[in-house]
Amino acid sequence: MTLEMLEVRTSQGGLLSLPLIDPTLGFVIENIEGLDPVKATLVSSSFAQQDGAQYQSSRREARNIKVTLGLYPDWTVDDVRELRKRLYAFFMPKTEAKLSFYHADGLNVDISGRIESCESVLFSQEPAVDVSLMCFDPDFVDPDLVTVSANTTAGSTEVTVDYVGTVDTGIVFKLNVNRSLSEFTIYHQAADGSLRTMDFAASLISGDVVTISTIPGSKFATLTRDAVDSSILYAVSPHASWIALMTGVNQLRVYATGAAIPYTIDYMNRYGGL
C-alpha cells in the first residue's frame, strides 16, 4: 500500500496535513518508523523432566511511531525557527495526538497516542525534526463503521461476515425487540473454526433495545426501555464467550424461538500493521 498523506489532529482540534512529497507547507515526511506489526510478549511454563515449555498466553506491546520531518522554509515569509514553532503546536511532549494515514488504494486508518519527544538539531544544513509517539493501543483502525443487519432465527440460518482486518475486533450488537422475549443466544463460528456462544436471559418487552458491546476495554450490556438506559450485564451468562471477529469468514447466528426480531452488528476493521 502506498502512503499518500499523513494528518495529525490535536485534542484541541488542530489539524496538520502532511502530503508525502509536497513541500508547500514547509514540511516533508522523510521517514516513518513503527508501522510494522509490534512485538508480542509470549508467556510459557516449563516443567521438570519435560523438554521445552508450554505456551500459556501472549499480548502485543505498545506501538512506538517515529516520524522524521524535513524543514523547507519559504525564506520570503518564514525561516526554520518558525517552522519548528508550528510543529510544537502539534508535537509538544506529553500531549495527545491522533495520526491518520491515507493510502492510494483508499484505505484510511487512524491511531492515537501521546507525544514522547520532539527533537531537532538546531545547527544543521539539512534541518529536520524527529517526533516519537507512543500508541498504547497498537492497532490502526479504519474509522468507517461497518454495519450488518439481520434477524433472529428459530432455525439454523447464519449470517456471514467477511472480516478484512488483520487483528481481532469486537462488535456492538443491538437487538430491537418487537415482542415479548425471555432469552436468546448468539453463536459465532470464527474463521479458524472455533465456536463461541453467548447466552442472554431476561424478561424483554416490545420496544426494548438490548445493546451488547464485546469491544475489549469497553464491554457492556445495556437495556433501553422508555428512553432510559440501564445495565443488564447480569442477563449475560457468566460462562459466555465475548465475541471477537477474526480475519476471514465469520458465521453468526442469533437464535430465539418465535417470530424473527431485527438486530444490527457494528464493528470497525483493525490492522496490526501497514
Image (tube, rainbow, N blue to C red):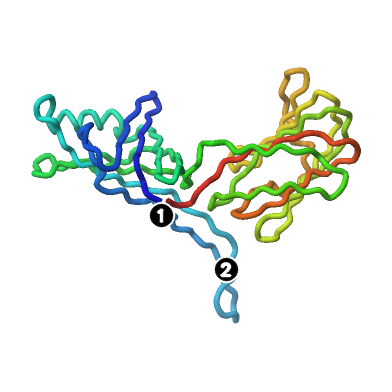
- Mark 2 element type: strand
Measuring from the top left, give residue 11's x and y in whole percent.
Answer: 40, 27
Left or right, residue 198 beside residue 182: left
Kindly tell me whether residue 239 is visible in this rendering: no
Report the mark closest to the observer, 2 or 1.
1
**Mark 2 or mark 1: whose residue is earlier in sequence:** 1
Q: Dot 1, how many residues are within 10 Å of its Cα: few (below 14), some (14-19), or many (20+)?
A: few
Q: Residue at x 77, y 49 (%)?
A: 158
Kindly tell me whether residue 71 is visible in this rendering: yes
Q: Residue furthest top?
A: 226
Measuring from the top left, give residue 53's x and y in whole percent.
Answer: 56, 73
Q: CA distance from mark 2 to mark 1?
A: 28 Å
Residue 48 versus residue 24 in the image, above or below: below
Tag 2: amino acid: Ser
Q: Which residue is mark 2?
A: 45
The numbered dot on residue 85 is: none
Q: Residue at x 40, y 41 (%)?
A: 101
Tag 1: amino acid: Asp
Q: Which residue is mark 1?
A: 36
- Mark 1 element type: loop
Q: Quadrant of residue 96?
A: top left
Left or right, residue 256 beside residue 1: right
Measuring from the top left, give residue 254's x and y in whole percent.
Answer: 79, 43
Left or right, residue 41 beside residue 64: right
Q: Quadrant of residue 200?
A: top right
